[in-house]
Amino acid sequence: MLSFFLWGLVGHFVLIPYASFLDVWSFDQFQSLVNGSKDDPVINQLLHQDKVVIFLHLLGCDTNGHAHKPYSSIYLNNIKVVDDIAESTYKLVEDLFKDNATAYIFTADHGMSDKGSHGDGHPSNTETPLVAWGAGIRGPRTSYIKHRSSNNFRFVDEHTHDMPTPIEWGLRDVERVDVNQADIAPLMSTLLGLPCPMNSVGNLPLEFVDMNEEDEAEAALANAKQVLHQFRRKSQIKQSHSLSFKPFKPLENSTSVVNEIEDLISQKDYEAAVRLSQSLRTLSLAGLHYFQTYDWMMLMTTITLGYVGWMVYIVMHVLKWYTYLQEKYSLTKNLAILMDQRDTKVYIFGTLLMGIFSILLLVERAPPLYHAYLAVTVFLWTQIFNDFQFIKAAWSTLISSESKCLLKLCGTCAVSILILEFLVASFSERRLYTLFFLTAGPCGAFYIMKSFRAYIGAPIFIWASCWILSLFTMFPADIPENTTLVITSGAIVVFIALVSRWFNSSVVAQKYCSSICTERKQSNGSKNLFIAQAFLVLLSSLMVSLSTSHRTQNRELLALHQVINWVLAGLGMVLPLFSVNTLLSRLSSVFLGFAPAFLLLSIGYEAVFYGALGLVLMSWILVESAILSLSSKAAPTHNDNIELKLNLYRRDDERYLQLSDMRVPLCFLVLFNVAFFGTGNFASIASFEISSVYRFITIFSPFLMAGLLVFKLFIPFMLVICVFSAITKLMRLPRLGCYFLVIVFSDVMTIHFFFLVRNTGSWMEIGNTISHFGIMSAQVVFVLLLFALTNVYTKNIEISSPHYSSHKVL
């Protein structure tokens, strides 16, 4: 009888103080099963049948690694527990079967970083142990034997092994054999004498099995046939559905290759048979990839045209409704008549085209998503061509403009694309933000000096705040735990809010920034609200210290402490609704309001990042206020230009978008992405530090834990969106029009990420390219959601602008 035993150090995170009992529990269950078989003939018969697989799931190391880190005493003790279980299990199995026909494999599905996470492509996370012994496993070979040595073995992501075998293991003279994780499936199947799993793409590691040359050749051929059959099945399905089928030419004579391998085996040329079998398997994998990407060109073209059509449609919508072309468009009656005449023809043609594509896809039995992609693309371009007369009118307006305007348009588009490509590159190298803010600081300072000529403090503030924020993107993405820094950040946040409150009522602010500030004398209610919010922030810092001390001492957090933390986080977000509704007062209150929740969910320097981001957002407000002040001074005021001045405004007291207003959505995207990557790598699952939720919950609740982590990540986003909404009010810009521009810019980045998506390489490389594309695709959705949420804080903001007053007088 042949049996098979597999240990798996795999699992998912469960928040408990000491998880090694999970391993003991697994062993106890198996031991009870074995002992029970002595009295139960049914269980005894099941255990003693041929080709039995027993899987022992050991969860403790994974759990304790997440909760207490891999170098903690708890984790090291768990390793000793696993060692003892491995020895006890071996003795139990050998005593049960007594036939020396059991093979043992000890492995894991992933590794772990020093901070207790996994999910990225670092070798410490992707390289796992593989120890095999027992029936069918060959003994170790000394390293000087050059027989299929894996010293130069390359994993599936084309890297060699990262860590040499430690000297203290005493295995220096033993040959090391590295394999890909997918290779374990054919190894297990071969040891059991079973066919390989139907969808397996692994390569049988012949170095592990104890076979003669003939059996090795037969096993290698069986492994190649299994992958070849997958290729043939995919080829058959695609050929039966395609109107114009293109075969994979390198495998058109695969049957003759299989016959050749069988002839080599019959001629006892086993080494050549193994080589040809491995070559056939490699070609079969290439054929599988060929059919998996068979529709790649059609899908890429359709999706790209869909994105381009969507962006063109949005740009046309902005031009029609949020620029001065709105009046020209609405006053052209003959254009409306032409539009009515073209509606029917365009829609009929679009419907026919969509019908033809749908019939072709139905004949080829394409998935429903193919129909959706083509339908959306055809619909968007139908809408675009339906507005052809408007496009023609807009083009006529453009070419009739002065050359200076055309140059300005081209320059603005070039700068916009440059910034968007910079943002794309920042997803892979976040230190680019350091260079950006080191440059933006002095540029903003010099510009604002035009407005604050007699006050040097504002330029210095802008310069310093940008340079402070530039430091954070140089820090490691893996945030080290530093409770002292989190506690200190509470005092920093209160100090920043105090400075903002002083500036809000200062003489300088009333002179240069009256549109964003209140009167010099503030009410007692405003003072009391500030004191209450500052108290909540400082109390949150105290609770951070108290909660962390309980965790480090392995003590359970009291229910009272959890309730206090929840109340601090919730109450802090409610109080800003009662603040003064002038721009700076309301935003300062929002900054203080989200601070308790963010501090309670922080573990290190990201708490300081919150304050630094607030400084830069304040700098953005000052720069826009300076631009408003300078444009007000430069605006025409004599009677001859009254009509020109009035034409800048829409009927809802919002002015039309101008080319210079592109800076607002661009600045928003830069700061929004800084909030993404300023304290880590949002696109990598390894950047999530689970210990940050300990102050709110100490039991396993995956949805609540994930919700708290996502909420923490969204807090900086909400700050940026609040400031963005306030700036659109300050500059009298249509917020919805600016949001549409954000959509267009995001889609430009999305198309770039779409072409960067990979399906080969390491877990990190594949996952990051997909997550980058997914983040940008979803950004327009959750930005809209956050707009709706933050509108509660920003909808009542009032702006006192002399420029606006002059417009009303005119």
Image (spheres, rainbow, N blue to C red):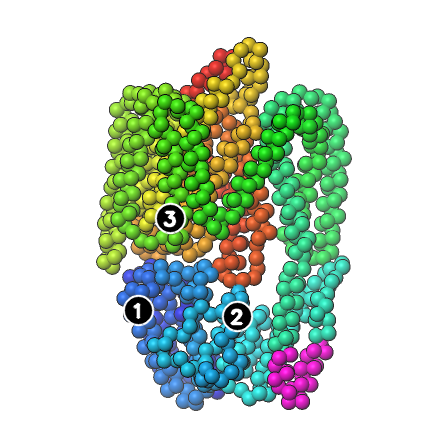
Q: Residues within 10 Å of mark 1 (few under 14, many from 20)?
A: some
Q: Which residue is mark 1?
A: 76
The reply to whether the magenta stretch includes residue 256 is yes
- Boundaries of the magenta span: 255-276
Alpha carbons under labels 1 and 2: distance apart: 30 Å
Q: From this viewpoint, is residue 128 visible?
A: yes
- Among numbered discs 1 and 2, the one appearing first in the sequence: 1
Q: In the image, is residue 127 above or below residue 256? A: above
Dominant secondary structure of the residues highlighted in magenta in the image? helix
Q: Position of residue 755 (x, y in %)?
A: 60, 51
Q: CB of mark 3 within 8 Å of CB of mark 1?
A: no
Question: Residue at 53% of width from left, 54% of height from top?
Answer: 769
Q: Are marks 1 and 2 in contact (CB under 8 Å)?
A: no
Residue identifier under label 3 = 708
Q: Amino acid at mark 2?
A: Arg
Q: Is residue 36 above or below residue 585?
A: below
Mark 3 crowd level (few <14, some 14–19, many ≥20, 10 Å Cα)? some
Using the image as rendered, state which of residue 428 and residue 204 is in the foreground: 428
Where residue 342 sits: x, y (%)?
75, 31
Disc 3 element = helix
Q: Which residue is mark 2?
A: 154
**Where's residue 702, x and y in %?**
39, 55
Question: Looking at the image, which is closer to me, 53 or 708?
Answer: 708
